[in-house]
Image (spheres, helix red, strand yellow):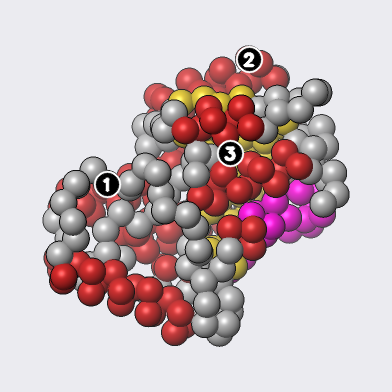
Amino acid sequence: MTLRLIDKTIVITGAAQGIGKRVAERAFAQGATLFLLDRSPLVFDVAEQLCDGQRHSVGMLADLEQWSSTYHAFEKIVQQTERIDILINNVGGTIWAMPYAEYTEDQIEAEIRRSLFPCLWGCRAVLPTMIKQGSGAIVNVSSVATRGVHRVPYSAAKGGVNALTQSLAFEYAPYGIRVNATAPGGTEAPERKIPRHTDPSQPTEQQQAWYQRVIDQTCETSLMHRYGTLDEQAAAILFLASDEASYITGTVLPVAGGDLG
């Protein structure tokens, strides 16, 4: 693994587990200095593991669904480092899986808050710093589930992430800022230590069937008929973040075994 991110300061949101954690591990191995944001205290464990004799990673608590929390987190980072070379907006994920007619108003709003607003707030918080320094790369983690079953509010949120990515790329290219996104398909990951919702009850037989339909559709529409790995997702994210992608902006890259969403 090359040191293609050496001397780069990277902020990774949602870094406590899953794709965000693997991105952090690979970015550190490639020479980056890391600021890891998450609302789970597990982020401190990840940061503690990603240290060596010369570099250490910083874990920070922040609720990226809220502007105030996001703004103050980025303000603290800039006070410490004075620059942010790369932002990886990774917060998001399906909370529920069911036909759209079954969602409540609160569930729809929660899905949008979880999977769209962290990208909106993260980009808004980092842009003044990147404009001032005249450079920067933003990678938003979207999804190929902009076309899929039983996740319509999530699909709408990720469609918003795609539009945000492309519009910001147009608007901020003159400032030397690249904005791209990856669109992961189904990804094998360890069981979440912190669940996406707080309902302690076991899923009903009907809820299990609805979720199984999501799994089946994901494998059916992928040309490779399998889930991806965390490393396959992290590799694409860090490619777009790196200088190797210096002539790529405004792109949404599917990382889904041929499923284009």
The Cα atoms of the two marked residues, 2 and 3, are separated by 17 Å
Q: Position of residue 76 (x, y in %)?
A: 56, 17
- Element type at marker 3? strand
Whether residue 100 is in magenta: the answer is no
**Residue corresponding to mark 3:** 12
Disc 1 crowd, CA 10 A, few/some/many (<14, 14-19, 20+): few
What type is the residue that disc 1 sits on? Answer: His
Residue extent of the magenta highlight: 234-254
Please indicate whether residue 150 sits to the left or right of residue 103 in the image.
right
- Position of residue 111 relative to residue 220, above or below, is above
What type is the residue that disc 2 sits on? Answer: Gln
Q: Position of residue 144 (x, y in %)?
A: 48, 68
What type is the residue that disc 3 sits on? Answer: Ile
- Position of residue 52 relative to residue 161, above or below, is above
The Cα atoms of the two marked residues, 2 and 1, are separated by 33 Å
Labels 2 and 1 touching (C-beta < 8 A): no
- Element type at marker 1? loop
- Element type at marker 2? helix
| Front one among 62 and 17 | 17
**Residue corresponding to mark 1:** 197
| Front one among 198 and 240 | 198
Number of callouts: 3
Residue 137 visible (yes or no): no
Q: Residue furthest top?
A: 79
**Residue corresponding to mark 2:** 79
Please identify, in this view, whether the residue under mark 2 or under mark 3 is nearer the observer: 3
